[in-house]
Amino acid sequence: MTAVSNWLSSINFAQIGQLLYSSSLQTLYMVIVASIITFMLALPLGVFLLVTSKGNFYEMGFINRIIGAVVNALRSLPFVVLMVAIMPITVFIVGTRIGTTAAIIPLIVGTVPFTARLFETSLRTVSSGLVEAAQSMGASSYQIVRRVLIPEAMPELIQNCTITVIVLISNSAMAGMIGGGGLGDLALRYGYMRFRLDIMIATVIVLIIMVQLVQMLGDYLSSKFDHR
Amino acid sequence: MIKIENVEKIYAKGTAKEVVALKHINLHINKGEIFGVIGLSGAGKSTLIRMVNLLERPTSGRVLVDNKDLTALDSKALRQARKSIGMIFQSFNLLSSANVYDNIAFPLRLDNDYSEDFIKTRVQELLALVGLSDKAAMYPSQLSGGQKQRVGIARALASNPKVLLCDEATSALDPQTTNSILQLLLELREKLDLTIVIITHQMEVVKECCDRVAVIDGGTILELGDTLDLFTDPKQQLTKTLVSAAVRRGLPELLRHTEIVKEYRDGDKAVVELLFLGPKADAPVIVEVAALCNVKISILAGSIDHIRKEPFGLMVVEIGGNKEKIQNAIKELEARVHKVEVLGYDRRQQLAELD
Ligand SMILES: Nc1ncnc2c1ncn2[C@@H]1O[C@H](COP(=O)(O)OP(=O)(O)OP(=O)(O)O)[C@@H](O)[C@H]1O
Ligand SMILES: [Mg+2]
């Protein structure tokens, strides 16, 4: 009993709060920026993978297979390996390979192929009959994507986004270890290297809360778009 | 209105999975006509109707709608041409993410030419046309099958098409709802001067509203004619089989277990099928002929039906008398009813004794 209360009284809440606050901001910065850019890149890529696939309305078998192979290759790399492997590209784009902004590049490269495949799968659930109906009304390919595929798959697409954000939170913790900052970095520096169990636990709690909030928001939005 | 000229469709041409779905089809569908296409599963019905708006491109041949050769159009012009060809589907194909209003507005919003005010007026007009004015804000999942198809029809008519294609449009509906949709189609044909192509496996649908019917089998047109002719006088075996689903022909149940022979022998009674058409259907033909020819005519079975509003009666009778009298009676019947067919001769005596 006394051991626990001693330990509790030794906790410096002000310090932890300070550290958590700045680390959380860094994590949020990485996750939010990476999420937005990932969605913007993955959606066209997912649409492309779908509509150019065999039997679909914009079939381009050869190019589809090539892009598909690249996407699969990127997906098969573990994030840590990818992070290190693309450092030259990171340096080229951001100018440095260390720091929160630099961590965003591998985060995006790591999740875009994954999310594009999720989007592709979700868009594929839209019945071909709907596409056909739109074609019979004289819709162009772009209009079919924009007004049929995406709205019809919206609940699933939002769920895909939820998964993506959660993966980004997890990857951002890893990115922290190569100087990206954020909660992962905090846990590593204090929890692992300085044996600060209190900070370790606090980090874990914050991460759990973040993931829960993202999931709840995703579920809410997804159900709002679902009229089936 | 629709001309299909020498159209052939081969799926997966040149591969091991090659399927010849249509073989050199020629078909003219007139303006204002309701044209039916029937056939067994896999006969090529859907392929044929999808040729009309080029959802499926013919391997060879031409498709003309309203004198425009669709096969010669580039993709932009084709999209424009499709706006004058509406289509409805078995599974309705409504956007589940959009309410009734937005579903009907969908084709109008494809062109940026229309203001939301215009669209609103038009959608309300269409809703009234299909009898769904109070359902604008509902989502398809909240509607019944019949209501969904009405939305489908309203959507297909939004851009004022000249042609309406229906691919098994009533197959997912119960008989009563099917009927209400068919009545709507008939009404729309009158109001909007539509040409309608209906693909179906429900003979009731054909019977109810098609002016002409084509029977297709193995990618060719097996038989084509006026609905009435096709139902009352089918030539091909397949047509007979298909048509019999709606109009039961031949020996009635009463004679199922009786030997009916082909050759006449003295004392036999003739079993004759009579087909009445139009206003004659209720004329007292039987009594008249029986009296005139001095034969005994007993009615074994009878039914009155209609084909496209036209009354249509089928009766199986037995005629008793000597050979000459029977032949005379048949001749007199032929002069009075649409069709007389001798099904055979009954050698039993009991029936005669009964009356
Ligand atoms: N996209 C396609 N690729 C390859 N073969 C096809 C394709 N669509 C149809 N077929 C084949 O073409 C033939 C005609 O098919 P179609 O769908 O026109 O028949 P249907 O008369 O509409 O049959 P059902 O009553 O079952 O709808 C069938 O043998 C079918 O397997
Ligand atoms: Mg079909």
Image: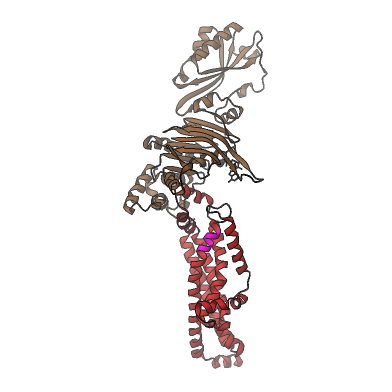
Front-lying residue, A10 or A167: A167
Residue drawn at point x = 50 percent, y = 28 percent: B227
Question: Could you tell me residue A190's position as x and y percent?
Answer: 57, 88
**Identity of the residue furthest to the left in this view:** B117
Residue drawn at point x = 42 percent, y = 53 percent: B99
The answer to whether residue B350 is visible is: yes
**What hue represents chain A?**
red
Question: Could you tell me residue B124's position as x and y percent?
Answer: 35, 47
Front-lying residue, A79 or A159: A79
Question: Could you tell me residue A13's position as x and y percent?
Answer: 50, 89
Secondary structure of the magenta portion, mostly?
Answer: helix
**Range of the magenta residues?**
A44-49
The answer to whether residue A27 is visible is: no
A46 falls in the magenta region: yes
In-image side of B123 versus B19 (left or right): left
- The chain painted brown is B
In-image side of B107 versus A42 (left or right): left
Q: Could you tell me which quadrant the N terminus of chain A lies in?
A: bottom right
Ligand 1 positioned in quadrant: top right
Front-lying residue, B19 or A130: B19
- Relative to A164, say whether B256 is above or below: above
In-image side of B159 versus B55 (left or right): left
- Relative to B24, say whether A161 is above or below: below
Q: How is the image coloured?
A: by chain
Residue drawn at point x = 41 percent, y = 49 percent: B107
